[in-house]
Image (cartoon, helix red, strand yellow):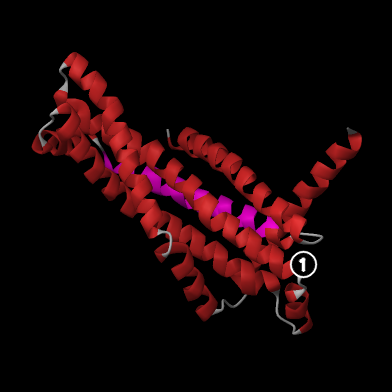
Amino acid sequence: MINQIKQLLENFGDFCLFIGRTLKACVCGSWDRFELLRILYLVGVCSLPIILATALFAGAIVATQVGSYVTKYRAYEVVGWGFGFGTFRELGPLLIGLMFSGRVGAHHAAELGTMKVTEQIDALRALAIDPIEYLVVPRLVAMVVMMTLLNIIGDFCALVGGMVTSYVLVGVDPYVFWNSFCEYVKLGDFLNGCAKAGCFGVCIAFVSCYMGMSVQGGAPAVGRAVNNSVVFSAVGIFAMDYGVTWLWN
C-alpha cells in the first residue's frame, strides 16, 4: 500500500513537471509551423464527422427528454430554453470532449508511445531537438483550438437536431422553439460551454501526451498508455466540468 502511494505521488510529480516543461516551451520555444498545421488537420478536420454525429444525437436526446415534460405540462414555450441550457452548458461539451478523448487522445498516446519504445524520441534528442517543443506543444495548441471550434460547430448542429426532434416527436413549431431559445438562452450559456471545451482540450492534451511520452517497455506498455490516457482524460473532463461550473456560477 505504501509503495503504491509512493508510486502515485511520483507519477503526479512527474506529470506536474511535464506540464511545467510544456508551458515553458509554449512561451519560450519556437513552434514548428508545418507540424502544427498537420496536427490541426488530423485533430480537427478528421474528427468533424464523428463530432457532428455526436452533436446531432445529443441535441435530439435533450429535445426528447425536455419534450416529455413539455407535453405533460403543455409548456411548449420553454422547450427551446430547456434544450439550449442543457446542451450548450453541459451535454454538448461533455459528450464531444469524451468522443474527442477517445479518438484524438488515444491516438496521440499511441503515436507518442510508439515513438518512445522505438527510440525515435531519443533520436530527436540526439539531433538537439526538444521533443516537448517539437511533439507536445503542437498537439496541445491544436487540441485546445480544435476542441473549442468543434464545440461551437457541434452546438449549431445540436440546435438543428433538437429543433427537428421537437417538431417531429413533440409537435413544437420551429418558430416557437427558436423564439424560446433566443429569449431565454443567454450568451453566457454558450460561452460557458466554450470555456469547458477549451479546458477539456487542455486536459486531454496533457494527459494523452504525458502517457505517451512516459511509456517504458514494448507494445504492452503502449496499450496500457492508451488505456490510461482514455480513463484519466475522462476523469479530468468530469473534474474540470465541475470546476468550471462552480467558478462560472
Relative placement, left or right, of 148 versus 13 is: left
Decide if residue 79 is on the left or right side of residue 61.
Answer: left
Q: Residue at x 51, y 34 (%)?
A: 242
Q: Residue extending furthest bottom?
A: 127
Residue stretch rendered in magenta on the structure = 186-211
Residue appearing at x 75%, y 85% in the figure: 127
Q: In this image, 133 relative to 86: left or right?
A: right
Image x and y of residue 216, in percent: 81, 60
Q: With respect to residue 65, does 230 lie above or below?
A: below
Q: Residue at x 54, y 42 (%)?
A: 237
Tell me where residue 75 sits by quadrant: top left
> Considering the numbered disc 1 on the image, is that residue within a helix, a strand or a loop?
helix
Q: Nearer the viewer, residue 223 or 5?
A: 223
Residue that label 1 marks = 117
Is residue 189 visible in the rendered image? The answer is no
Q: Given the image, on which type of amino acid does mark 1 rest?
A: Val
